[in-house]
Structure formats: C-alpha cells, structure tokens
Amino acid sequence: MGDTVADALAALLRRPARTALYRRLTAGLGEAVDEVTYPVLSGLARFGPRSAADLAAEIGLDRSGVSRRATRLEDAGLLRREADPRDQRATLLALTPAGREAVEVMRRRLAGGIEEALASWPPGEAEVFARGLARFAEQGPFTAP
C-alpha cells in the first residue's frame, strides 16, 4: 500500500502536474498572476506576512526567486512590502486586499475542481478519502518534527 500512495503522491507533485494546475487556477486573474507567482500568493495566504527568505523556505524557492516574483505582484497591487514590527530593518511581504481576493478566487477554483473530480465517486467514498487524506497530512511522514 505504501508504494501505491508514494506513486500517487509522486504523480501529484511532479512539476508538470503542478504547473498545469496553477495555470488553471490563475487563468484570467491578470498578467502578474500565473503559474510562476502562484506559490508566492498561496504561501502568503497560508503563512501570513513573511520575509522573502522565510517565505522561500516555506514554499521551496530561493530568496531571489521569491523577491523577483514579489516585485511582479507588488507592481500589480497584489502584495506590499512593509516593515517588520519585530525588526524595523527587515521587510515583510504581505497580501493586499486585491491579493487576498485573487487567492480566494484560486481557492474556490481549486475546491470546485476537486469536488468535480470526486463527484462520480460512489456515495460516501469521497468523504472517507477526504478524512483519510487530512489524517495522513497531519500524521503521515510529511509532518514537521
């Protein structure tokens, strides 16, 4: 069973699969919102304001990559840079109201796509899957120490 789960996760986590998903989620949301900037928007929505270095560590990019993407998003009015209240020399990246709205659209699209994919499953099976996946995410090998 472990091999089956590992193979399924590998398929989901492949860069082409993620890129295709991000393109669907970001379609029509503006020139700055695409498969490249999606991880920054999504990361800030999940983790709140972060420095570029801290966000990079959370989303698996390097600091300079996050900074370049943040500049595109800032120019589009989707994020802002603000002083870190704990260290006035440091800068945090934070979503603007327009950025939060874009993330909400993407989340609705993602949830709708998942629900559509599970709609043909036998009654109750999708709920069992959702509960099991949530439990696996909380207790499985991906949990932080």
Image: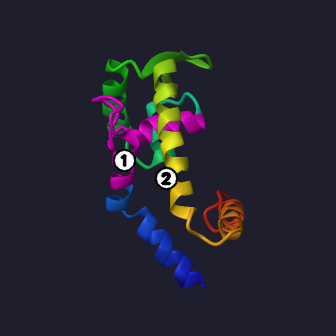
Q: Is residue 133 left or right of residue 23?
A: right
Residue 33 is situated, as x and y percent measured from the top left of the image, at 34, 33
Who comes first in sequence, dot 2 or dot 1? Answer: 1
Near-viewer residue (25 or 91): 25
Q: Is residue 115 magenta?
A: no
In the rendered image, the residue lying farthest to the left is: 31
Residue 96 in view in this figure: no
Residue 104 is situated, as x and y percent measured from the top left of the image, at 53, 33
**Which quadrant would residue 121 be assigned to in this image?**
bottom right
Near-viewer residue (60 or 103): 103
Could you tell me how far apart the alpha carbons at marks 2 and 1 are, in whole angstroms? 10 Å
Query: Which residue range is magenta in the image?
Result: 19-47
Q: Residues within 10 Å of mark 2 (few under 14, many from 20)?
A: some
Q: Which residue is mark 2?
A: 113
Q: Indicate which disc residue 24 carries.
A: 1
Please state, as top left, top right, bottom left or bottom right, where the N terminus lies in the image: bottom right
Tag 1 secondary structure? helix
Q: Name the amino acid, label 1.
A: Arg
Tag 2 secondary structure? helix
The kind of secondary structure the magenta stretch mainly shows is helix
Q: Are marks 2 and 1 in contact (CB under 8 Å)?
A: yes
Q: Residue at x 55, y 67 (%)?
A: 120
Q: Residue at x 46, y 21 (%)?
A: 98
Q: Residue at x 33, y 54 (%)?
A: 20
Residue 57 is situated, as x and y percent measured from the top left of the image, at 48, 45
Q: Residue at x 71, y 68 (%)?
A: 124
Q: Name the amino acid, label 2.
A: Gly
Q: Residues within 10 Å of mark 1 (few under 14, many from 20)?
A: some
Residue 19 in view in this figure: yes
Residue 111 is situated, as x and y percent measured from the top left of the image, at 55, 48
